[in-house]
Structure formats: C-alpha cells, structure tokens
Image (tube, grey):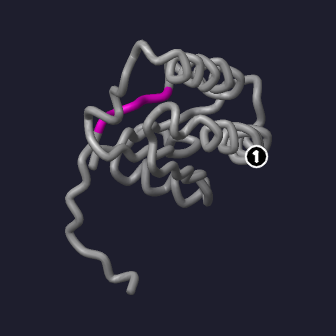
Amino acid sequence: MLKLVYGVRRRADISEEEFHRYWLEDHGPLVKSVAKDIGAIRYVQSHTVVPELNASIQAGRGFLQAFDGITEVWYESLETMQGNRDDPARQEAGCKLFEDEAKFIDFPNSMVVMTEEHEIFDYSD
C-alpha cells in the first residue's frame, strides 16, 4: 500500500482556527465525495495542537516550524494512485481538490511526499 503524506501550512490571511475548521468541515467532506474517482481508500487529517510544546521540541532539535497539520491519503498501489489519467471524473475530482486547497493552504510552504509504511511496533491493542 502507498500513502501520500502532505505537510500543510495555512495561508497567511487565514486564522489557525478557521484553517482547521475549513479543512475538517469543508475540505474533508469534499475529499470523501471524490475518493473513488481518485482511487483513494483512506484519508486522515492530523491537526497540529499544543503549539508551545511544538515550539519547545523544535527549538531543542533545530527543526523547522511545525506544519499546521498532516494529511495522509492511502492507495492500494501505484497503479490505483495514478489511475486512468484520461478519465474525466478523475480529472474533475483533481481540479475540485486543487481549487479548494488553494482557498486555505499555503502551497509554497507546504510539502507532499509518496511513502510506504514500515510498522516497527503497535502497542495500541
């Protein structure tokens, strides 16, 4: 399974509160509505919390400023992630997502990377 991981930062003209609200209540349902068109099987938003602790950890390690959140989008395979690029529904879904993301995400200060998970442990059970 492959996973696209996005580290997102909010646009400067949007408050942190509005960014998280819009991302969760507006963008999340949009992603869900086009999931089959883009071949996604799972979508998770992780919103950044506890800014004081983040700043302390960053300063102690010399890290860059934290993202406002992380999005993970899972795909069965590279083939399903790439899908049929000529499919009109897939193209329309991609355009809808990009146009909506431009409303709240600072693209130049965000990032995306394709990953493959390697679970080392899971003590959650």
The residue depicted at 69 percent of the width and 43 percent of the height is 29
Q: Position of residue 54 (x, y in %)?
A: 51, 54
| 121 up-or-down from 62: above or below | below
| 68 up-or-down from 87: above or below | below
Left or right: 84 as drawn, with respect to 26: left
Near-viewer residue (100 or 93)? 93
Question: How dense is the environment of label 1, judged by Cα within 10 Å: few (below 14), some, or many (20 and up)?
Answer: few
Q: Position of residue 51 (x, y in %)?
A: 61, 53
**Image quadrant of residue 27?**
top right
Left or right: 17 as drawn, with respect to 54: right
Dot 1 corresponds to which residue? Answer: 25
| 98 up-or-down from 8: above or below | above
Left or right: 16 as drawn, with respect to 54: right
Our reading of the magenta stretch's main secondary structure is: strand
**Image quadrant of residue 86?**
top left
Q: Residue furthest bottom?
A: 125
* Amino acid identity at mark 1: Glu
- Range shown magenta: 110-114
Secondary element type, mark 1:
helix
The residue depicted at 33 percent of the width and 33 percent of the height is 113
Task: Determine if the magenta segment contains residue 70.
Answer: no
The residue depicted at 66 percent of the width and 43 percent of the height is 28
**Image quadrant of residue 93?**
top right
